[in-house]
Image (spheres, coloured by chain):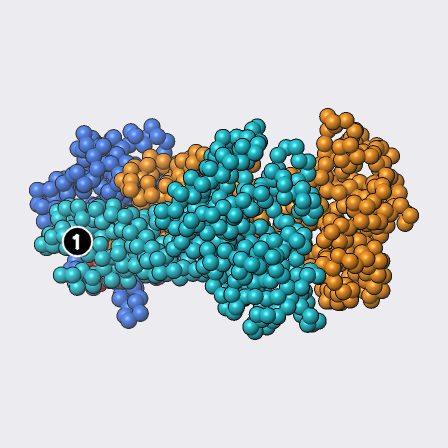
Chain colours: A blue, B cyan, C orange
Amino acid sequence: MLKMENVSKIYRTNLIETHALRKVDLHIGAGEFVSVTGPSGSGKTTFLNLAGLLETFEEGDFYLDGQNVKGLSDNQLSELRNEKIGFIFQSFNLLPELPLFDNVDVPLRYRGFNAKERKERIENALEIVGLSSRMQHLPTQLSGGQQQRVAIARAIAGQPKFLLADEPTGNLDSLMAQQVMELLEKINQQGTTIIMVTHDEQLARRAHRNIQIFDGQVSDLAKDQTDVLIQSE
Amino acid sequence: MFAYNAKLAFKSLNDRPSLTILMVAAIAIGLGLFMTTLTLAHQAGKIPIPHISQQIHLVQLDNREVTADDAENFNEMVDLTYQDTNNLLNLNMAGAEQTLVWNSYGILNVEEQNIQPLRSSIVATNHAFFNMFEVPFLYGKAWDSDADQFAQAVIVLTKKSNDYLFGGTNSVGQQVRLNTQVLTVIGVLDDWFLARKFYDRSYYQAFPDQGLIPSNFAFDNNFPRNARFDCWSTTTNPRKFTNNYLTELKTSECAWITFWAKLPNNTKEDYQTQLGQYIDSQKLLGRFPRKNQYFLTNINEQLSIISSMGGRQQMLGVISYMFFAVCLINAVSILLAKFMRRTKEVSLRRALGAKKRTILQQHLIEVILIGVIGGLFGIAVTYLSLQAMLRVNLYASDYMRTAADLMPYHQMDWEMIMMAFSVSVGCTLLVGLYPIWRICNVSPASQLKAQ
Amino acid sequence: MEFRPILLSIKHNKAIAMLVIIQVAITLTVLSGSLLMTTSTLKEWNLPSGIPHDNIISAVPQFYDLDVDVRQSVVDDLAGIKALPGVINASPVTQRPFDAQGIQKVYLDATNEAQEYDTNIFTGDANFHEVLQLSLIEGRLFRENEIVTGKKDELNATPPIVMVSEDMAKALFPDGDALGKTIWLAKGASPVEIIGIYSNFMNGERLNYFGQSYRTVLQPLVTWQNREDPSYLIRVEDGMAEGLLETVRNQLYQIDGRYINQVEVLTRTQKRMYDGRGSHAIMLLVISIILLLITAFGMAGLVSFLVTQRQKQIGTRRALGATKWDVVRYFMLENGILTSIGILTGLVLSIVFAFVLTEDSGVNILDMSYIFATAFFILLINQLAVYFPAKKAANVEPAIVTRAA
Ligand SMILES: Nc1ncnc2c1ncn2[C@@H]1O[C@H](COP(=O)(O)OP(=O)(O)O)[C@@H](O)[C@H]1O
Ligand SMILES: [Mg+2]
């Protein structure tokens, strides 16, 4: 589970202060699939960055999997990211020099698994995203959808509790977006909590629950609506 | 288009100035050391009296005993004996001028008590020396053949010793003492810069003698003979001839006198014939036991044989080449990295319609600019490092030489400056080719694909 | 260790990798070559002189008027010099420390096949040891009446006794029983007896070069010949040497018909003995240091540039759980691999270069320990040059991955 209490994030540049998040209170339970929507510049990415421990915050408390992450050292945060969180980015962020196999390998190396275990996990993850046959290809040799699937494989290879996705389909056409979404749902069914930022209403609705952010403020109103949707299915 | 590309190139150099400074500094310093050794070699390799150096020949006759080793060049051959020197001088060689040179030393002093005596190296020679080598005179003139014949007590001072002994005034007709002998100053030399002191075969840089006197006068007064005596093995301890045993030396087969002949244009063959004949005539007298052999080596030939013998300077040369290579590689790896970062931008420009040529031009301008700036700073570095070398050499000479003496050997001339410039631009271009080639071959599409 | 991803990344940037490798290889070659040359030239450099050279003046006068009575002038000179305030003692000599000319030989027997020992033969009167402040190790000193004085080719007999330095005694008689033994100063010369052994002092450049800096023989002899008059070694009180130079020169100048070739403190003579080699070696060292700086700065510049290029990559790694140290280590390892390959290539080049230099100079300068030390040093410098930019790069906010396009 993930719990934020009164969390605020302010960006200070020398000219202005931007209140990117204002007093966010939020609870996301284990196994949930949450979509985050909102207008551009409203603070979605900021929220995801905080949730994913990519950025630190000034006020409030944040419990990840029961542990208060406030005041943890940089190294401890790295360790938590590595163990508990998988990331999927809009622009994929694969390492261009490395073949797929080695791209998926990156977080596993930091995890300190032995070679055998890494190999198993990599093959398994690539199997799940359906790219086992292209293990030795370089990212540039793949289409956008395929690249994103590699990114997903990389995110799940360490079997994290949380999967954070920032507009994972933003650079993809609708067919590929569908495939990626199906993949995410499949992963969610196996117990991984997923938080996905998206512009796409359609996709957002497929989540268990929808969080909306306006001007740094979270409105969790949509919860009932999502429940209704789930029930109606 | 050129203006636009030039602007882009400047902008790129300005983009990360610290990297540009690194590249320029690497090239400048590498070039500096490279040009320093090149300049030293260039100046050291300069030929004295270049306009007549090909006519001035060292004359050596092979009077050695049968058991002596074969000689390949002048450096392995002995000089002349006293007898042969005299005989050759007395031969009538049409068109050829001849002179002899040997070194002596003594104390030059004047009546004036508060001028302390000057320890001097002295050249013993004949009147032809001055005309043959086109020696410049400040005051007076050379002595004439009578002075040689009658061993007159005359001396030609160099400018420096005249400055020291007579305060730079016209001392012609004044008297100086060489040790205890009184001589009359007959001439004073003007500055006479020789890239190498060739005439006594020392090839020293900047070690001037203080005075010149007639050889016969030097013999008559038994001035020390500062020479290497190549004698037959029957002569024990040839060094004894330095101060004594002049009569024995004069009739011996000991070779020790440097002998020069100036052979303009077509006189060389004639001269050779005469030398051959002379050796034959001597053979009849029982001398010259080996085959009829002589060496006529002009100044250029001598210097090329000597300079091929290497040493420390050469070692420094090799190191400076490698040093420059490292600096160039250093610069080019930064350049390559810089260019490679621009692939995205370049492929965008290409997609927007830029021709390969334009991209090439833009990057060529950048590389040439780096070469030019590196060259400019490199020349400054060369200047500084030559100055440093000068100090080092002054220190190493224990301040027996002056900065002014050494300056000509540590100086860039226009030739060297142009050279530095072209080396800098040329080498930068050469190593810059690969990065340029890489960037020019970026395909318009490659980088637009999402990554 | 994450060799595989690093190797893959190197493969991806072959050209730059090659350049780094070549640069390291040549740098190693030049550096180790210079270092070998330097150490071989400086091998016997600045050894202890064994004498208080700062307080000894050497004066070299020379008569050009050959009618002067040298014998009397030596007596007068010595009396005059010793009377100068600040002068402790003086001795007439033919060779001076740091300045011994050439190499002389001594022999252990009179036969033609006698083994020869290189040395420098010094001469002096009974004050010699006091001027140089030599200590007597064994035997006795020369007595006044044993000093032979005269023009060289008019001497009836050379002195039948000598003293030798500690090192010379050891070289001639390794068993340590040199005292009282007989040696020959030339083939066919009359034998001389070793009556004393004194502490070592520096002879001159030639023997120093062969590592025999302290081999000397001392004869109780004051001689001269045409144009080679005795020089004087003068010991003065502490710190007075420089100030006395002019006084000594003027004192010697009192006698007419001679030229004062040189009056200097032995410190300068010592400098002159080493300065040719020293300046050459120091020049090489300076060049080496500059080269090292260029390589280090170039490497730092290159890496700091490359890491800014890879900011996104670093951010991605950080997001995936890499600690800052992981990032730094990655770059250091990458550089370490390239540098090591460069070093391996450079080792081969260095050995070849050292061989060429050895051929050239005739002295075997190849010493692997120096080459290895240089290699290690380059590795260290390069790692440092990478460490700082890499550490800076590791501070990239991991959030960059969600921000940058
Ligand atoms: N590093 C930053 N420095 C300053 N302001 C920032 C920074 N990152 C984001 N912001 C500002 O914070 C607000 C929220 O941004 P973001 O979370 O990226 O929005 P979204 O992802 O919803 O489009 C925006 O106004 C944005 O300009
Ligand atoms: Mg966003």
Would residue C324 be seen by someone viewing this image from the given angle?
A: no
Chain name for mark 1: B
**Residue B58 location, x and y as percent?**
48, 46
Residue B433 lies left or right of residue A56; in this view the side is left
Q: Which residue corresponds to the image point at 30% horizontal and 59% vertical from the top-left?
A: B372
The one nearer the camera, B54 or C242, is: B54
**Residue B128 location, x and y as percent?**
50, 55
Q: Which residue corresponds to the image point at 63% horizontal and 41% vertical from the top-left?
A: B251
Mark 1 Cβ inside 8 Å of ligand 1? no
The relative height of residue A29 versus residue A186 in the rendered view (above or below) is below
Q: Which residue corresponds to the image point at 24% horizontal and 36% vertical from the top-left?
A: A99
Label 1 sits on a secondary structure element that is helix
Residue B434 lies left or right of residue C169; in this view the side is left
The one nearer the camera, B277 or B297, is: B277
Residue C357 lies left or right of residue A189; in this view the side is right
Residue indicated by mark 1: B359
Q: Identify the image quadrant of the N terminus of chain B.
A: bottom left
The one nearer the camera, B227 or C358, is: B227
For the image, the number of numbered tags is 1
Q: Which residue corresponds to the image point at 62% horizontal and 49% vertical from the top-left?
A: B226
How packed mark 1 is, by other alpha carbons closer than 10 Å (few <14, some 14-19, many 20 or more), is: many
Residue type at mark 1: give it. Ile
**Residue C179 location, x and y as percent?**
85, 35
Would residue A200 be seen by someone viewing this image from the given angle?
A: yes
The relative height of residue A82 versus residue B199 in the rendered view (above or below) is above
**Residue C326 location, x and y as percent?**
38, 44
